């Protein structure tokens, strides 16, 4: 099955399921769905940063400071967070990502999606999916901040990153 054929739960503004459609149609028609964003850090606390492959359905070839993706139909956010983190990092046996908060991302013409933000410590050797990740590195937060104006970032990941900084500052 291709990524475009994957079935997603379509949700309302309160994150209640109102239908199910293939990912390709949900994206094309801007249907609200669910996503997970997982900030992965290595043993030194550096952030996993990557550039998406040019074949991605959404935001091809852009940089991201999260791993993650869509939540499948009937799948819980927590299940999707672990699945997506292990898939994108290319590891098995990752600790369960810690849920931090959820927000409704507004992508304008692209639609909106409920976004659950997590964090996880990855002390395993990563081997990212070549279908998903064109380049990767673990970067310090200072290096990520320095790269923000220089690199083209996925807009939803950038929104999650800004909200995560606010979340941490408020704690």
Image: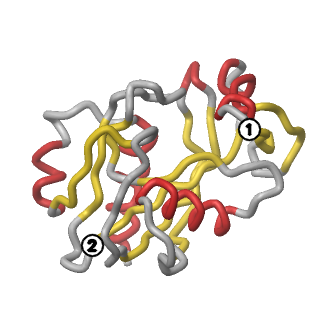
Give the residue displayed 82% in from the left and 33% down from the top: 21
Whether residue 99 is situated above or below residue 158 in the rendered picture: below
The percent coordinates of residue 140 (x first, y second) are: 15, 63
- Towards the viewer: 92 or 18: 92
Q: Quadrant of the C terminus?
A: bottom left
The percent coordinates of residue 8 (x first, y second) are: 76, 41
Please indicate whether residue 91 sits to the left or right of residue 143 in the image: right
Residue 12 can be seen in this image: no
Please indicate whether residue 115 sits to the left or right of residue 74 in the image: left
Query: Could you say which quadrant of the image residue 57 lies in?
Result: top right
Residue 63 can be seen in this image: yes
- Towards the viewer: 93 or 59: 93
The percent coordinates of residue 77 (x first, y second) are: 67, 62
Give the residue displayed 68% in from the left and 51% down from the top: 71
Q: Quadrant of the N terminus?
A: top right
Q: Residues within 10 Å of mark 1 (few under 14, many from 20)?
A: some
- Towards the viewer: 20 or 55: 55
Residue 6 image label: 1
Q: Residues within 10 Å of mark 2 (few under 14, many from 20)?
A: some
- Towards the viewer: 13 or 100: 100
Whether residue 133 is situated above or below residue 77 in the rendered picture: above
The percent coordinates of residue 5 (x first, y second) are: 74, 31
Please indicate whether residue 146 sits to the left or right of residue 134 in the image: left
Gap in angstroms between the C-alphas marked 1 and 2: 31 Å
Q: Residue furthest right?
A: 19
Give the residue at mark 2. Answer: 42
Give the residue displayed 41% in from the left and 55% down from the top: 163
């Amino acid at each position: 099955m291709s990524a475009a054929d994957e079935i997603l739960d379509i949700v309302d503004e309160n994150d209640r399921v109102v239908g199910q459609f293939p990912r390709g149609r949900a994206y094309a028609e801007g249907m609200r769905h669910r996503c997970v964003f997982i900030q992965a850090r290595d043993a030194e606390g550096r952030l996993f940063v990557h550039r998406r492959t040019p074949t991605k359905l959404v935001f091809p070839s852009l940089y991201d400071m999260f791993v993650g993706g869509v939540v499948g139909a009937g799948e819980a956010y927590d299940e999707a967070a672990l699945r997506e983190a292990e898939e994108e990092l290319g590891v098995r046996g990752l600790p369960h990502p810690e849920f931090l908060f959820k927000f409704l991302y507004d992508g304008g013409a692209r639609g909106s999606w409920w976004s659950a933000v997590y964090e996880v410590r990855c002390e395993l050797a990563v081997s990212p999916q070549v279908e998903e990740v064109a380049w990767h590195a673990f970067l310090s937060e200072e290096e990520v901040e320095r790269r923000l104006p220089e690199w083209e970032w996925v807009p939803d990941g950038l929104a999650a990153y800004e909200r995560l900084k606010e979340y941490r500052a408020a704690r």
